[in-house]
């Protein structure tokens, strides 16, 4: 059996995360035709299809989901192998690998980057971007030292420190009737088009939204899925929909005719945590978590007070 090249695995992972060939190609700094050829070559080598695709959009096959989960581990181990060897060549520099999501509040990330540890003056932080549930799994597997995760249920192998508990924000057109309210409740969203982060990104949150809504007798007219906040904003415009987004992501796209309102539902809250392995023995990790706790403690309450609604 011939093993696929790392670059082909990276191409497949990008398509799996974007579910769109054009966006994945932009992310990899290559043309769409080059990316398509790489995916075709990979599927030919392994002997089965990873994606069902129509023009630029792509959906993972059942076999593709299993393959991509393992491919991420292969790429992560290859990257760690290079980093570990580089540390030998360059000298003993402490590297802290931290996972985050593109939906993580940038303020939390920038705050972590300002942390300096007296015991580890040469510490370097390397950020890895992925969906929260994937980052949590990589911490458990030992491929990340810690991660900022949102909307991930309790996992016995993780120790978590909650740093924020915020509502969803609903992004809508400025001329939407709901924009006249300071906050939105689920019953006001009945029989509307909903824009949700795809189930592949966070099945727990996806199912929770629908479970809470169904329990209240609230059902959407239709559901559209997005991967990036910018894609969500386009779907809001196209379908006069209501997009469920974290605060920072909603704030980012609330312009050019769009506004945002908090979702007033106690059962639908976005808890952001700093996660490490329960059995972590690393003094570097433990010292960093202590420092992060001091810096991040209470930050969400302070920033929430400064946030003003648009529109």
Image (cartoon, rainbow, N blue to C red):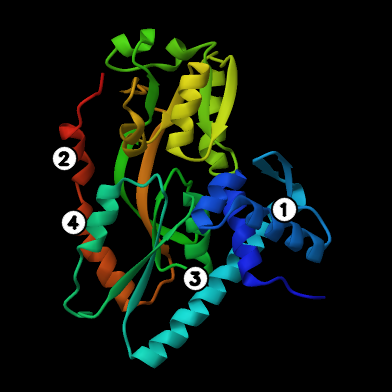
User: Is residue 220 placed above or below 83 in the rendered structure?
Assistant: above
Residue 237 or 195: which is nearer the viewer?
Answer: 237
Residue at the image position 46 percent from the left and 14 percent from the top:
189
- Which mark sits nearer the N-terminus, 1 or 2? 1
Residue 10 position (above or below residue 234): below
SS for callout 3: loop
N-term mark: 4 or 1: 1
| Above or below for 193 versus 126 | above
Disc 4 target residue: 295
The reply to whether callout 2 and callout 4 are in contact (CB within 8 Å) is no
Circle 2 sits in a helix, a strand or a loop, which is it? helix
Q: Secondary structure at mark 4?
A: helix
Q: CA distance from mark 2 to mark 4?
A: 12 Å
Indicate left or right for 218 with 9 as reference. Answer: left
On the rendered structure, is 238 left or right of 50? left
Please state if 69 lies on the left or on the right of 189 as rendered: right
Q: Which residue is mark 1?
A: 64
Among numbered discs 2 and 4, the one appearing first in the sequence: 4
Distance CA(mark 3)–CA(mark 4): 25 Å
Q: Residue 302 has which mark?
A: 2
The quarter of the rendered structure image containing the N terminus is: bottom right
Q: Is residue 248 left or right of residue 41?
A: left
- The residue carrying mark 3 is 142
In front of the other: 217 or 262: 262
Give the mark nearer the N terminus: 3 vs 1: 1
Cα gap from disc 4 to disc 1, whole angstroms = 41 Å
Give coordinates of residue 154: x percent, y percent.
Answer: 47, 49
Between label 4 and label 1, give the one nearer the viewer. 1
């Amino acid at each position: 059996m011939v093993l696929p090249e790392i670059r082909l695995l990276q191409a497949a992972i990008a398509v799996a995360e974007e579910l769109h060939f054009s966006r994945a190609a932009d992310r990899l700094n290559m043309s769409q035709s080059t990316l398509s050829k790489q995916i075709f070559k990979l599927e030919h080598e392994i002997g089965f299809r990873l994606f069902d695709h129509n023009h630029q959009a792509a959906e993972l096959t059942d076999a593709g989901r299993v393959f991509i989960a393992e491919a991420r581990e292969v790429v992560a181990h290859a990257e760690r192998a290079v980093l570990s060897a580089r540390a030998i060549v360059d000298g003993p520099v402490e590297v802290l690998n931290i996972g985050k999501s593109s939906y993580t509040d940038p303020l939390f990330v920038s705050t972590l980057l300002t942390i300096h540890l007296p015991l580890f003056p040469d510490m370097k932080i390397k950020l890895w971007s992925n969906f929260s549930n994937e980052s949590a799994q990589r911490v458990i597997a030992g491929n990340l030292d810690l991660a900022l995760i949102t909307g991930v249920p309790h996992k016995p192998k993780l120790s978590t420190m909650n740093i924020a508990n915020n509502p969803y924000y609903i992004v809508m057109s400025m001329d939407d009737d709901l924009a006249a309210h300071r906050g939105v409740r689920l019953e006001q969203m009945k029989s509307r088009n909903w824009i949700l982060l795809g189930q592949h990104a966070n099945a727990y949150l996806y199912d929770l939204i629908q479970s809470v809504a169904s329990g209240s007798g609230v059902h959407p007219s239709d559901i559209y899925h997005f991967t990036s906040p910018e894609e969500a904003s386009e779907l809001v415009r196209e379908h006069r929909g209501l997009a469920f987004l974290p605060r920072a992501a909603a704030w980012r796209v609330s312009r050019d005719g769009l506004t945002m309102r908090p979702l007033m539902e106690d059962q639908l809250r976005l808890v952001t945590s700093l996660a490490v392995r329960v059995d972590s023995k690393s003094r570097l990790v433990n010292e960093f978590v202590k420092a992060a706790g001091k810096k991040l403690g209470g930050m969400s309450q302070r920033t929430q007070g400064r946030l003003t609604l648009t529109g």
